[in-house]
């Protein structure tokens, strides 16, 4: 379910793009330093939004450093300093929880190629001790893990019944990101992070379902969209309607960015939500470059 949340880089200011990359590299370092040397294997750009949101809400100034690393041994890269940077450390640990359960789900998915499942199983074995350690040592992460497990169980139970209630399915899935975004926060920050995370999580569930529907149809796996509309072709015929629904989630999330304190991360967050998500949606729904929607004549 990961890999869809990216910015529209060409519309980021130069300083915003540099900061975006610095957050990514800082998060990679936080995973290595505060979770496990193997955790960077699970890192993807989706988590930069979560990190940027937490950095903004906690008003954390961007202290940067230039360092070499395993991924870039010959050239120093600018990254956020992770020492005493609570939002980055939290994001590294929260992303570990999400990645842990995603890996477990992928391993059980018999539709995936054997070697991919075998690789994911190796990664899961490597990161499990670190996952258990951070759950033992951090009550917030332990609580997040419990909530994630409970919501995934609810989602799995509905999917096993072949539910066509897309709203409920998306709502439960959205709660996964809502919890990851808001755990440990209080008051208005908690509400903003929770609602923003939930709307993006609901968008993500439907986009992922649309992207996977042909593969799911061939394998006979559950897909909420084909259950709801009856076939892959009928889902495609309703792409415009689906786009309208998920656009409402994006709009709701974009409205919530007005509640963020004024920080250097706001441009990145708004770009991802208002531009990056739409580009991804157009690519998935209409197979376009994100600018021109395909119409059903």
Image: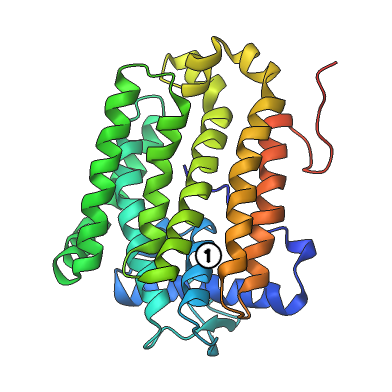
Horizontal and vertical percent position of residue 178: 41, 54
Residue 1 position (above or below residue 216): below
Side (left or right) of 75 relative to 29? right
Callout count: 1
What residue do we see at 30% from left, 46% from top? 101
Residue 38 in sight in this render: no
Image quadrant holding the C terminus, namely top right
Side (left or right) of 214 relative to 92? right
What residue do we see at 46% from left, 30% from top? 167
Horizontal and vertical percent position of residue 168: 41, 31
Write down the residue under mark 1.
48
Q: Could you say whether the residue bearing mark 1 is in a helix, strand or loop? A: helix
Crowding near pointer 1: few (<14 within 10 Å), some, many (20+)?
many
Residue 174 in sight in this render: yes
Side (left or right) of 45 relative to 233? left
Horizontal and vertical percent position of residue 163: 38, 19
Task: From the viewer's side, name the closer residue of 106 and 37.
Answer: 106
What residue do we see at 33% from left, 77% from top? 33
Horizontal and vertical percent position of residue 12: 75, 68
What residue do we see at 38% from left, 70% from top? 187
Residue 288 position (above or below residue 14): above
Q: Find residue 151 and report its image quarter.
A: top left
Residue 154 position (above or below residue 279): above
Q: Find residue 237 and report its image quarter.
A: top right
């Amino acid at each position: 379910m990961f890999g869809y949340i990216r910015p529209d880089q060409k519309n980021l200011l130069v300083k915003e793009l540099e900061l975006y990359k610095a957050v990514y590299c800082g998060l990679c370092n936080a995973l290595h330093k505060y979770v496990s040397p193997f955790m960077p294997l699970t890192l993807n750009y989706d988590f930069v939004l979560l990190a940027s949101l937490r950095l903004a809400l906690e008003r954390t100034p961007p202290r940067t450093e230039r360092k070499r690393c395993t991924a870039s041994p010959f050239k120093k890269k600018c990254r956020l300093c992770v020492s005493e940077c609570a939002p980055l450390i939290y994001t590294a640990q929260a992303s570990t929880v999400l990645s842990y359960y995603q890996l477990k789900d992928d391993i059980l998915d018999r539709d995936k190629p054997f070697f991919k499942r075998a690789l994911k199983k190796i990664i899961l074995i490597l990161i499990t001790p670190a996952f258990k350690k951070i759950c033992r040592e951090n009550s917030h992460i332990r609580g997040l893990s419990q909530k994630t497990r409970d919501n995934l169980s609810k989602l799995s139970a509905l999917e096993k019944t072949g539910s066509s209630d897309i709203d409920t399915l998306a709502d439960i899935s959205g709660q996964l990101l809502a919890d990851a975004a808001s755990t440990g926060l209080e008051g208005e920050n908690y509400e903003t992070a929770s609602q923003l995370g939930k709307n993006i999580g609901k968008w993500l569930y439907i986009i992922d379902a649309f992207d996977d529907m042909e593969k799911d149809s061939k394998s006979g796996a559950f897909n909420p969209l084909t259950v709801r509309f009856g076939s892959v072709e009928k889902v495609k015929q309703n792409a415009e309607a689906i786009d309208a629904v998920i656009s409402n989630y994006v709009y709701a999330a974009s409205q919530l960015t007005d509640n963020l304190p004024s920080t250097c991360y706001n441009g990145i967050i708004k770009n991802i939500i208002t531009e990056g998500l739409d580009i991804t949606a157009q690519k998935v729904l209409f197979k376009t470059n994100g600018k021109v929607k395909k119409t059903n004549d």
